Image: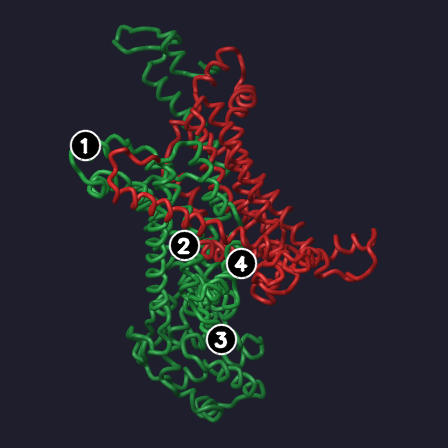
Amino acid sequence: MALPTYASPLEKVWHYAYLALCAAIFFFLIAPIVVVIPLSFNAEPYFTFTDKMLSFDPEGYSLRWYRSLLTFGMANPDAPGGLSWWADAWQNAKWVKAAKSSIIIGFFSTILATVLGTLAALGLSRPEMPFRRIIMAVLISPMIVPIIITATGMFFFYSNPCEPLTWIGLNPECGRLAGTYLGVILAHATLGIPFVIITVTATLIGFDQSLNRAAASLGANPRTTFFRITMPLILPGVISGALFAFVTSFDEVVAVLFIAGPDQQTIPRQMWNGIREQISPAILAVATLLVIFSIALLTTVELLRRRSERLRGLTPS
Amino acid sequence: MPNAIDPHAAIVTEAGGLDQGGTLRTADGQPLKAALARSSRRARRRAFLLVLPLLLFVLLTFVLPIGQMLQRSVKNDGFSANMPQISAWFAANPRGTPPDEAAWAALAGDLQAAAEARTIGVVGTRVNYDMPGTRSLFTSAGRQIRRGIEPPYREALLAMDEDWADPKLWSVMREASSAYTANFYLAALDRTRDDAGNIVQAPEQQRIYVTLFQRTFWLSLVITATTFLLGFPIAHLLATLPMRKSNLLMILVLLPFWTSLLVRTTAWMVLLQQQGVVNDILVWLGVIGNNQRLQMIFNQTGTIIAMTHILLPFMILPLYSVMRTINPSYVRAARSLGATSWTAFRRIYFPQTLPGLGAGALLVFILAVGYYITPALVGGSSGQLISNLIAMHMTQTLNWSMAAALATLLLVGVLILYWVYDRLVGIDNLKLG
């Protein structure tokens, strides 16, 4: 934003002060995320820059915390490297196990949230949809209701999923969902659904319904119309919704704390333990990897958004 | 018209015209009105069927668990289920009846049965919620009573412990004896019942919840205000810069938004701790001495700083999308009519940003009120919010009904705000990124 030519000297000073303020706020936004990256290469178990790091002495930096991510929890971390060492890391290292369960839970909950969410968004975007407002409010609410409340409710439900049946006089026996992969996947799918609904309905706002009619008038049945016309056009929105759902699951810790068992320790859960118990720079190494991961996701979503806008004939912004 | 994709189009192209009665008819002779009604019914059913699977899923995995939580907040079976005889006596005799020999006999019988069934601990724990220090009364009575007990029961129980005659204990047991109770809500509002059953304020040292609700409300307001102060200039800058530049700068807003919550919280712990980067820089600059390092974390300051950072994008994004649509010629017109830049901003520009401001502020406030992870990690004891207390009751004291009552009160507050948000902004206008 250029300063108008008629600006007075005072306004010029004010303008530059304003730009400096904005720079400071951007610094506040981004600095905490950037600063963990060099700190994760610290050779000492400290959370600040050592003198050696500040003088760029190579001895001040090391990869020891990244290595500790692999070895932490291994049965025999000092064994000579080789196939058995890697097998040990794959089987026993806590962070590796956490990454595996995070990916399993994230993958299946994303699929569930995306399929159900996209179908619902298609229905919600039709002008004929009855009770649209109230249904939308219910479907978005998992995002608005504080996670601690959701997790509390889920704890009761997942510990004994048949309890509500006793309210109507039945008394069936059924197993627990708490402590199983299925339980955590269902919980995370619920939390990811609002994001899918929001992104897909936003894509459908600009969707030209006459394209569907054109396809139908040319003899396509509803199925063909959906897969050949609708789907390719809304796909960018569906994929960004799926990425949002995946990130929600990948970053979720409260529901995992409440309903997961020892087999479903995800990365955030492992970080939570690490922060609460013995905080070591290994946490910063994980944080760095997660920052890189989020940069990759952000780039993907931005590219998809631009592609979607181009497809729908909007001016790219 | 069974296979018509768009029934309206079919009716228009093949309209049958008017019959003798003056009714419009379609080509196959049905009244037009009925055909239209049927086709719109079919369209509504189709739209609804698309939404139905998800609706059922959310009802099952989200609404039902919340309902179960509501039920748990009034459920009171820890005592009543394990002490049936004395519960029946309480039900049969009005409040204020002094315990007669029948009551003592019922109590002794229940204690004996509970001790045999090893549920006496559950009973003691339940009474202990309302009257701290009574759990051992029940467990030790259980141990002694298993060796046998002879009438008269009153004297036998009093011989075990004088406290059995305490009228407060009998009042608490009466409260605990109904299968459903509102007492957890009373406790959540720092109220309790006295011996006569009247609702009174809890003793001074037990009043924690109202203070915590107030603190949660107050800290959320402060966080909303700081996100507004920091978010407004940024949103304005992004909205007035040319697209290419603002898109680049937008990445700086979106990157924190996409970064893991735990990563951001960890980063603030690393930065703000006493031996952390911020204190190091301040010492190096000579602002503070090495022995006066600031305590910026594990207190309210830590909660406010970290949560402002985490919630800032939720303020910037709605403000930005409203500011983008503001026509700059209004401000120019004001300036050309002689307004100073401050007047033009205050009278012309700022009022037009209010919809975005309202949306952002409500969203930030709603999210802040229920925050759990960040206060738990950086809040110390003075920066804890109501969510942290819910988690404590869920995982440490295991007083689940209390946790459910607190969660329900918080839920009511959030749902009211959500309703206001929907009225003012509309959920459809919620945007991500």
Marks 4, 3: nearer the viewer: 4
For marks 2 and 4, the one nearer the N-term is 4
Label 2 and label 4: CA atoms lie apart by 15 Å
Element at label 3: helix
Q: Which residue is mark 1?
A: B336
Look at the numbered discs 4 and 3 and tell me whether their residues touch, using CB distance below 8 Å: no
Q: Which chain is red?
A: A
Say whether marks 1 and 3 touch (CB < 8 Å).
no
**Three-letter residue code for mark 2:** Thr
Q: What amino acid is at disc 3?
A: Thr
In 3D space, how far apart are the residues under numbered discs 1 and 4 (Cα atoms)?
51 Å
Disc nearer the start of the sequence (2/3): 3
Query: Residue A36 appears in which quarter of the rendering?
Result: bottom right
Q: Name above or below for residue A302 compared with residue B290.
A: above
Residue B266's tag is 4
The answer to whether dots 2 and 3 both sit on one chain is yes
**Distance of label 1 from label 3 (alpha carbons):** 75 Å
Q: Nearer the viewer, mark 1 or mark 3?
A: 1
Residue at the disc numbered 3 = B125
Sequence-wise, the earlier of marks 1 and 4 is: 4
Q: Which residue does the numbered mark 2 point to in the structure image?
A: B308
Mark 4 and mark 3: Cα distance apart in space = 37 Å
Q: Are marks 1 and 2 in contact (CB under 8 Å)?
A: no
Q: Secondary structure at mark 1?
A: helix
> Which residue is drawn at the image coordinates 41% and 16% (left, top)?
B7
